[in-house]
Image: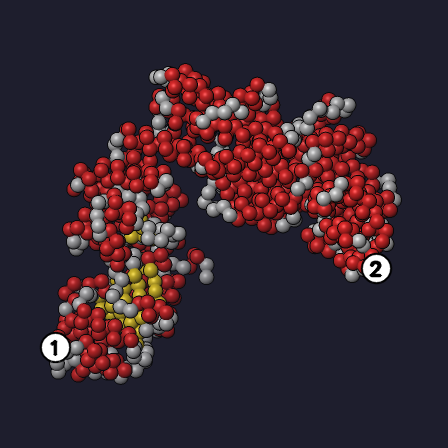
């Protein structure tokens, strides 16, 4: 069914087709319960269901408070039933006074009378919340214990009726329609508005109306009627101050509440959300649990909070109405409630709520003290957006007068790449006076740290060594500066390819930061550890570390985005492209100007690459251009060059030569070749390496293979000297593709096998296939001819590459019979896909000894290469 015909105007109302169809299910169960607040549309739904042809005989009672008398209730029921069903026998009721009989006798008599009715009978009790009489409720309960055949009870109520609902639910003898099902939808608003004769609603009006009413039908109808009377501006300004709405809440919600319940009900609206413990402490009550139970049973717009058992909130309009009433009737309680709520939420480390209440308490000292604690906690946990939001509410003089506010703000501005604002506040902070010598000393250390922090992130790989790094590492207990400095130095070493140093510093930083409660920065240090291991070729360690923390971190935590970034790399390398794409799409709305640049770049680059693989060239290009726009906020040349590399790679693999030339000209690849033709940097630079690979692609595309080979050889020497195995495998794979052009198949096989031997089979992954265009096609050709032997687990990882199984003969001998124990151990490690270095590490042998063992293994097994040995052993 299309959404367009889900609703249609009916006599100034609208027809809820899907809900009416749902209500038809009542013919299959003894009891149907419509439970929702006043104005939710229960009576409208019942009326529309009854007006349709074919539901059967319907006896409908719209109940009033006077019907709580059992005699009156049963007399009205008998009269209504007799009018609808002439054959209904009322003799069961007439001879006696029901007030003098036990409910079981009345129920039995009623059961017998109803049993005589032929065909389905539907008994509808609307506004059942008025029925509290134990006698009446007992009669209905007894009737539900043994319902007559073809008799179906429908109860609409604002409160939970005191019947055995749980039993009926367990027995599948109950249909429940609640407030969530009765929420009005966009197309129904349109239909209702048309039925009332209103003008067309624009998108802004519709969004505001649905948002502020939360789909509450009565609220929508009141708003539409007000707009018809006073113009559409009334709709845009609609809130709880509307006279019709205030009158409605007074009569439908507050009326009838006992005084104590009414007071707690109104005061609890000062809390955005609450549970019994919070209400008891903040409202100084000992009956909050009973109050919440009472309000819940009355369906007074009390909404359970998903994922937080026992916590509730009020409908937004009702909350605003109640707060306004509190301000009028009991203004003296407002500030004390907010002060107590502040203390409660600080203890709970819920600083968003704590600061909100502190602000409304009207106590400047309390507010600033709470905000200092909040800034510290938010920085530790990575909730940087909260710091930025609240800083906007403070004057510069307030921020600069307290290091506890200014230091977290400047750190946050730095991490979120708002470098000009960070510099503004840092320079102003240097001039801010401090009262005593100790405060001045602490202030000076904070400024030194913030200055280094800003330099490192603003200048990226241009950050200067020497004195600045020494200053970073000066020990200081103030604001845990040393712990932050360890992580910063680890990041610095990672940028410059000093991976062992990055590992050492990041491991130490993570340990200290976790001990001090800096969970977000500890997560960042952990990501540095994983990336360093990954680049060193320790794939197993990196993958295990990332997997453990990704699956062990709550998605609600900002730290999750860090581990998710590492997981994107793992999934992509393992060719789990759908999972990588889903994770990137999950991350995309979360990455913002407050996110680490590594996170943003990884998400954008991976999504762009995935779109390119899917043939979505334009979206892929737009993603890369958007990333370049983000990177303009700082000196991020290495990330820019990563983006340039991906632009060139995509154009190269797609054969789009005009685009490749345009990118080459835009980023001066010819200039890079000219300036680096004979020059090799002394130390590794990620930025230099990425742009150099982009230049190599451009040279290959233009047929300048000798120059491309020379560029790749220089890249390889620097990358290998830094020990960055992941990048070395990519550069060497590109060299292999160039040399393979003029080589025989046998020579090509030998070179591919050497590549696998040097780096380990698992390191020849999806990223290597992507960034060494032509490698996948070459390996597929050799494998399909039976010349390159690869284990099945590996070819299964890349079905798009290895899509036809070659014939492979099993080994002629049994390894267990011909190999020594040490050779068997090394052979088993070989089958795990480890490189020679990895085998040496696990077996406790030198590289030379490992190679000697492997030579003997190949000879004894009658094979010529490691991959042939692995594959033929697996085939045996």
522 lies left or right of 228: right
Front residue of 566 and 650: 566
Q: CA distance from mark 1 to mark 2?
A: 99 Å
Name of the residue lying farthest toward the front:
821
Q: Residues within 10 Å of mark 2 (few under 14, many from 20)?
A: few
State the mark number for residue 62.
none
Image mark for residue 100? 1
Residue 433, horizontal then vertical, whole percent: 37, 16
As helix, strand or loop, the secondary structure at mark 1 comes to helix
Q: Position of residue 188 (x, y in %)?
A: 37, 55
For label 2, the SS is loop
Q: Nearer the viewer, mark 1 or mark 2?
A: 2
Kindly indicate the quadrant of the structure image that contains residue 376: top left
Q: Where, by quadrant of the figure, is residue 700 drawn?
A: top right
Residue name at image x 64 percent, y 28 percent? 496
Q: In the image, what residue occupies the spot 86% across and 51% down?
A: 859
The residue to which callout 2 is attached is 813
Which residue is pictured at 35% across the width and 68% down the height? 169
């Amino acid at each position: 069914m299309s959404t367009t015909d889900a609703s249609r105007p009916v006599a100034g109302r609208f027809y809820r087709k899907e809900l009416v169809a749902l209500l038809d299910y009542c013919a299959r169960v003894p009891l149907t319960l419509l439970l929702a607040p006043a104005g939710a549309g229960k009576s409208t739904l019942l009326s529309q269901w009854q007006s349709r042809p074919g539901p059967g005989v319907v006896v409908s009672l719209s109940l009033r408070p006077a019907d709580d008398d059992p005699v009156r209730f049963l007399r009205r029921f008998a009269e209504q039933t007799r009018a609808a069903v002439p054959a209904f026998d009322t003799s069961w009721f007439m001879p006696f006074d029901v007030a003098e009989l036990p409910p079981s006798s009345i129920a039995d008599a009623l059961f017998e009378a109803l049993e005589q009715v032929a065909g389905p009978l539907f008994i509808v009790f609307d506004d059942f919340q008025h029925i509290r009489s134990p006698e009446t409720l007992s009669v209905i309960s007894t009737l539900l214990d043994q319902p007559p055949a073809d008799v179906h009870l429908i109860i609409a109520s604002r409160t939970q009726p005191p019947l055995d609902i749980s039993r009926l639910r367990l027995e599948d003898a109950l249909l429940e329609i609640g407030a969530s099902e009765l929420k009005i939808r966009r197309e129904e608003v349109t239909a209702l508005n048309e039925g009332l004769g209103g003008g067309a609603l624009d998108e802004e009006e519709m969004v505001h109306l649905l948002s502020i009413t939360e789909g509450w039908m009565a609220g929508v109808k009141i708003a539409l009627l007000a707009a018809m009377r006073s113009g559409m501006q009334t709709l845009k300004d609609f809130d709880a101050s509307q006279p019709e709405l205030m009158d409605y809440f007074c009569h439908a919600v507050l009326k009838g509440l006992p005084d104590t319940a009414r007071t707690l009900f109104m005061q609890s609206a000062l809390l955005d959300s609450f549970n019994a413990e919070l209400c008891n402490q903040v409202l100084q009550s000992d009956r909050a649990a009973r109050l919440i139970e009472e309000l819940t049973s009355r369906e007074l717009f009390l909404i359970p909070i998903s994922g937080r058992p026992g916590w509730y909130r009020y409908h937004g309009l009702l909350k605003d109405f109640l707060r306004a009433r509190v301000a009028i009737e009991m203004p003296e309680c407002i500030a004390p409630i907010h002060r107590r709520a502040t203390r409660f939420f600080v203890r709970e480390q819920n600083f968003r709520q704590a600061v909100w209440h502190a602000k409304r308490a009207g106590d400047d000292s309390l507010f600033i003290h709470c905000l200092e604690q909040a800034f510290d906690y938010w920085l530790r946990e990575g909730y940087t957006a909260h710091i930025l939001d609240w800083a906007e509410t403070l004057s510069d003089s307030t921020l600069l007068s307290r290091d506890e506010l200014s230091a977290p703000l400047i750190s946050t501005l730095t991490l979120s790449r708002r470098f000009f604002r960070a510099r503004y506040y840092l320079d102003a902070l240097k001039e801010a006076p401090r009262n005593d010598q100790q405060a001045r000393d602490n202030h000076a250390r904070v400024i030194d740290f913030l200055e280094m922090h800003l330099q490192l992130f603003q200048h990226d790989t241009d950050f200067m060594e020497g004195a600045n790094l020494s200053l970073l590492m000066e020990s200081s207990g103030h604001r845990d500066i040393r712990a932050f400095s360890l992580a910063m130095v680890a990041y610095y070493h990672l940028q410059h390819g000093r991976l062992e140093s990055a590992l050492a510093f990041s491991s130490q930083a993570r340990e200290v930061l976790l001990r001090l409660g800096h969970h977000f920065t500890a997560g960042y240090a952990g990501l540095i550890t994983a990336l360093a291991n990954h680049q060193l070729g320790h794939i197993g360690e990196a993958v295990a570390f990332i997997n453990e923390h990704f699956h062990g971190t709550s998605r609600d935590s900002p730290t999750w985005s860090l581990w998710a970034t590492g997981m994107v790399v793992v999934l992509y390398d393992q060719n789990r492209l759908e999972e990588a794409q889903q994770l990137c799409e999950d991350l995309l709305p979360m990455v913002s100007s407050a996110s680490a640049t590594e996170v943003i770049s990884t998400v954008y680059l991976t999504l762009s690459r995935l779109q390119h693989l899917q043939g979505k060239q334009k979206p892929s290009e737009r993603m890369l251009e958007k990333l370049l726009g983000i990177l303009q906020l700082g000196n991020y040349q290495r990330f820019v060059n990563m983006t340039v590399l991906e632009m060139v790679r995509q154009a190269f693999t797609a054969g789009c030569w005009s685009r490749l030339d345009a990118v080459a000209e835009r980023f001066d690849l010819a200039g890079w070749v000219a300036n680096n033709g004979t020059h090799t940097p002394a130390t590794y630079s990620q930025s230099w390496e990425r742009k150099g690979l982009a230049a190599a692609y451009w040279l290959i595309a233009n047929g300048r293979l000798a120059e491309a080979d020379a560029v790749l050889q220089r890249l390889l020497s620097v990358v290998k000297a830094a020990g960055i195995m992941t990048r070395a495998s990519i550069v060497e794979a590109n060299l292999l593709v160039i040399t393979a052009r003029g080589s025989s198949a046998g020579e090509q096989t030998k070179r591919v096998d050497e590549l696998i031997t040097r780096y380990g089979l698992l390191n020849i992954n999806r990223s290597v296939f992507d960034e060494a265009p032509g490698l996948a096609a070459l390996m597929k050709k050799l494998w399909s001819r039976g010349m390159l032997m690869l284990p099945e687990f590996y070819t299964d990882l890349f079905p798009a590459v290895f899509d036809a199984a070659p014939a492979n003969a099993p080994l002629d001998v049994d390894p267990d019979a011909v190999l020594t124990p040490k050779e068997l151990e090394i052979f088993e490690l070989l089958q795990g896909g480890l490189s020679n270095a990895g085998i040496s590490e696990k077996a406790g042998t030198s590289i030379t000894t490992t190679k000697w063992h492997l030579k003997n293994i190949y000879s004894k097994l009658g094979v010529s290469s490691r991959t042939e040995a692995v594959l033929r052993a697996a085939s045996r």
